[in-house]
Image (cartoon, coloured by chain):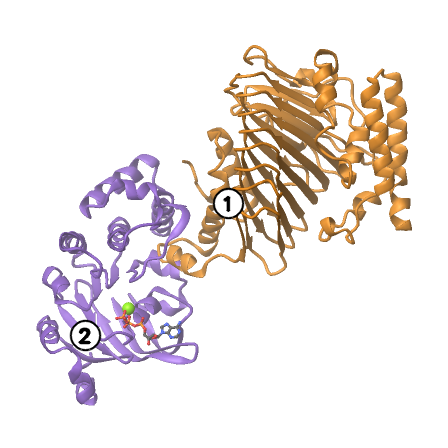
Chain colours: A orange, B purple
């Protein structure tokens, strides 16, 4: 324990100085007090250790022991060419870009939105949407027991804000791009996002994290979604950090009655990745779909930690997570389904499938059900396997080399999740990214 | 074209093939018949390169080459094709992507250019028509959710597309309705030619009414115990295999 307290000291100091700095930046009093509270929480909690049940398989001491500094910024905008290949220009029309945690207006593009829809950085929203921010920002992702949420809340400098008013349908996806350029000494960023949809609205959001160069860095992100009554949200998180990056991200979605949220979490980069994905179904008749795909090779460690909390009756939740583990890659999945006493007629499904491509790859899969209602349908299943030899043989008798056959089968495994992506151009991109990570993947032609 | 000499193969220490001798020349159609469990599929799989069977003795030559030294895909590229008795389902792999990969692998081996999308589609369309397979099946994953007959038809479709030198059909007729049987037989007959050979594994004469064999062999307990012309199949249809039990030794000398 002493160890934990010592190693977090530099972070506590960061929180203190950040809060001091914001005082002069005239942050509203309510936010200052939230930050104070968060800093206190973080000081009390410290970084989780593997003795903590929720972190048993993911050791974050490498983060705790590195005295990351707050990323600094260049006043001038990056050249667009630097981010062009990550900008998803053929997928999305509207884009908010953050470089090292700071909003870059020059790299953003905010036109073409329907009337009344707001997409801007949080700092700007403080002026235009103060009451909305006050009632939602840092009100959904809980600092209690979540040290990284507390740390982000104390430290975040800026972030993305999306607000879709009642009944409005936003057709083209909105892209929020968080780009990192590693610095020396190593630096951290605290990306933050708040998405609020009002009743009967509909929106698609792509949230991507990219590393522009190699070098150690630490991203600690928090995204909060408030899904209004009968609203529909399609959310994609695409993690493409550099291969030395630590990436910790918490996703919190609070469902109101009848809301329908599909969130897809794709993890490809980073040396240590942890996704905390929390859904709170706090209204009747909600639909919650959580899809995930993760590819770990080399010594990558990717941990997906899900918690679906059914608080009201007649809600459906679906979790489909698939992992491909090669080299010495590690894939962790833990999924908790909670069904509270009132949540009758809950229908919850969870599945985690892992494909092991090397003898040194490792998988942990931990389902957890906590059911207090009596009229519910809950199923979970986990499979861990290798490429099917009979399928391999079949493909090879048709002329495909061993590598080509394996690549085709591994790609097919991933394809199930990619097929669930509703943006065609994003599917194509994911095909490319997944294949690029597979040995021999480049030679496979998968054009639809 | 194919020469099998004293082939012994085991699985999990259990000997399934116990000294097979078989010669198939270009232009010929051979039929292999025999009771359940006698080793027909095993023989087909060993020729195709399934490594769960261990070849403990003997050799297989294909156009003079040592077939057992080749990987399954190399055998395919040399021109061997097996229509499986139980084709496997491959969810997530689209039929067209699979076919394109297969065709291009084989073309590359032959030193031919890869097909462009247009030529590929043209070939697929032509062959699909030939074996009367529904185009829509090809937009699905390989064999996924196909009916038994559809799977068999898909095997023959692939054969038609890949144009092998030696095609081995393992009970392709079982599970086919009468019309499909004719279509499949027609597909096979279209492939017949002086430079190709076909091995038809079947339990039924009705398949051989359409694909008339030059030779018929009876496989029993891992050995070819009798060989003859097409009339042997008719004889088996009437007599069954009870004679095997009565005097198996008397027939072994008939093996080619
Ligand atoms: N993996 C295996 N393990 C043990 N025995 C096996 C295995 N595979 C095949 N066999 C045995 O080998 C023998 C031959 O099987 P094979 O499938 O070749 O028969 P077959 O002649 O094709 O029969 P059928 O007419 O029913 O298709 C059978 O007794 C079978 O049980
Ligand atoms: Mg058989």
Q: Is residue B176 left or right of residue A214?
A: left
Residue B138 placed where, x, y %?
A: 31, 43
Q: Chain of mark 1?
A: A
Q: Nearer the viewer, residue A228 or A297?
A: A228
Quarter of the rendering containing residue A276:
top right
Q: Is residue B115 at least partly visible in the picture?
A: yes
Judge whether A401 appears above or below B67 on screen.
above
Q: Which residue is mark 1?
A: A414
Judge whether A378 appears above or below B232 on screen.
above
Q: Which residue is mark 2?
A: B217
Residue A340 placed where, x, y %?
A: 62, 43
Q: Nearer the viewer, residue A60 or A88?
A: A60
Q: CA distance from mark 2 to mark 1?
A: 46 Å
Q: Chain of mark 2?
A: B
Residue B149 placed where, x, y %?
A: 24, 54
Total numbered badges shown on the rendered structure: 2
Residue B177 placed where, x, y %?
A: 17, 55
Q: Are marks 2 and 1 on the same chain?
A: no
Q: Residues within 10 Å of mark 2 (few under 14, many from 20)?
A: many
Quarter of the rendering containing residue B7:
bottom left
Quarter of the rendering containing residue A188:
top right
| Mark 2 and mark 1 residues within 8 Å of each other at the beta carbon | no
Position of the C terminus of chain B, as image quadrant, is bottom left
Q: Is residue B247 at least partly visible in the picture?
A: no
Q: Quadrant of ligand 1?
A: bottom left
Which numbered marker is on residue A78?
A: none
Q: Is residue B146 left or right of residue A187?
A: left
Q: Residues within 10 Å of mark 1 (few under 14, many from 20)?
A: many
């Amino acid at each position: 324990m002493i160890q934990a307290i010592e190693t977090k000291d530099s972070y506590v100091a960061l929180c203190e100085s950040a809060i001091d700095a914001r005082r002069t930046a005239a942050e509203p009093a309510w936010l200052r007090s939230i930050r104070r509270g968060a800093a206190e929480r973080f000081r009390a909690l410290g970084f989780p250790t593997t003795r903590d049940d929720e972190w048993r398989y993911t050791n974050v001491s490498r983060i705790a022991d590195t005295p990351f500094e707050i990323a600094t910024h260049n006043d001038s905008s990056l050249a667009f060419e630097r981010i062009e290949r990550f900008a998803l220009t053929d997928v999305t029309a509207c884009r908010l870009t953050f470089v090292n945690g700071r909003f870059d207006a020059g790299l953003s593009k905010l036109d073409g939105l329907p009337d009344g829809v707001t997409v801007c950085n949080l700092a700007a929203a403080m002026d235009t949407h103060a009451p909305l921010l006050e009632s939602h920002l840092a009100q959904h992702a809980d600092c209690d027991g979540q040290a990284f949420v507390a740390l982000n809340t104390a430290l975040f400098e800026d972030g993305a804000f999306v607000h879709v008013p009642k009944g409005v349908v936003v057709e083209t996806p909105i892209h929020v791009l968080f780009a990192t350029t590693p610095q020396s000494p190593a630096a951290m960023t605290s990306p933050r996002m708040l998405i609020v949809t009002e009743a009967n609205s509909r929106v698609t959001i792509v949230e991507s994290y990219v590393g522009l160069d190699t070098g150690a860095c630490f991203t600690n992100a928090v995204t909060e979604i408030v899904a209004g009554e009968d609203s529909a949200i399609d959310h994609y998180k695409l993690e493409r950090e550099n291969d030395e990056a630590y990436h910790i991200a918490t996703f919190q979605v609070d469902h109101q009655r009848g809301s329908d949220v599909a969130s897809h979490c794709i993890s490809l980069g980073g040396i240590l990745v942890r996704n905390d994905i929390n859904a709170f179904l706090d209204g009747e008749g909600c639909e919650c779909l959580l899809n995930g795909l993760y590819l770990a090779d080399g010594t990558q460690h990717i941990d997906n930690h899900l918690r679906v909390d059914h608080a009201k009756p007649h809600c459906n939740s679906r979790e489909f997570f698939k992992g491909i583990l090669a080299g010495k890659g590690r894939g962790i999945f833990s999924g908790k389904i909670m069904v509270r006493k009132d949540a009758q007629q809950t229908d919850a499904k969870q599945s985690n499938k892992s494909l092991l491509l090397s003898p040194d790859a490792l998988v942990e899969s931990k389902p957890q059900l906590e059911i207090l209602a009596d009229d519910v349908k809950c199923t979970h299943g986990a499979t861990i396997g290798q490429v099917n030899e009979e399928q391999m043989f079949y493909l090879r008798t048709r002329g495909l080399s061993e590598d080509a056959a394996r690549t085709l089968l591994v790609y097919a495994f991933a394809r199930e999740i990619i097929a669930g992506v509703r943006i065609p151009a994003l599917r194509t991109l994911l095909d490319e990214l997944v294949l690029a990570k597979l040995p021999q993947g480049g030679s496979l032609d998968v054009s639809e | 074209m194919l020469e099998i000499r004293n082939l012994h193969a085991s699985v999990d220490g259990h000997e399934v093939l116990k000294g097979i001798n078989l010669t198939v020349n270009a232009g010929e159609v051979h039929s292999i018949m025999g009771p359940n469990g006698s080793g027909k599929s095993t023989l087909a799989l060993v020729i195709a390169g399934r490594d769960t069977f261990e070849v403990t003795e003997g050799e297989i030559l294909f156009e003079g080459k040592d077939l057992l030294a080749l990987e399954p895909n190399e055998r395919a590229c040399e021109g061997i094709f097996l229509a499986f008795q139980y084709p496997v389902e491959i969810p997530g792999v689209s039929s067209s992507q699979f076919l394109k990969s297969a065709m291009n692998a084989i073309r590359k081996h032959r030193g031919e250019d890869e097909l462009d999308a247009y030529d590929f589609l043209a070939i697929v369309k032509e062959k699909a028509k030939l074996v009367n397979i529904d185009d829509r099946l090809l937009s699905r994953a390989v064999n996924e959710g196909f009916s038994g007959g559809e799977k068999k038809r898909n095997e023959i479709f692939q054969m038609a597309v890949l144009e092998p030198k030696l095609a081995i059909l393992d009970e392709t007729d079982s599970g086919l309705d009468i019309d499909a049987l004719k279509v499949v037989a027609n597909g096979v007959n279209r492939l017949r030619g002086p430079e190709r050979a076909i091995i038809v594994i079947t339990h039924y004469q009705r398949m051989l009414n359409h694909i008339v064999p030059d030779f018929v062999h009876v496989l029993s307990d891992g050995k070819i115990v009798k060989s003859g012309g097409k009339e042997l199949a008719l004889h088996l249809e009437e007599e069954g295999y009870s004679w095997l039990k009565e005097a198996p030794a008397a027939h072994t000398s008939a093996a080619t």
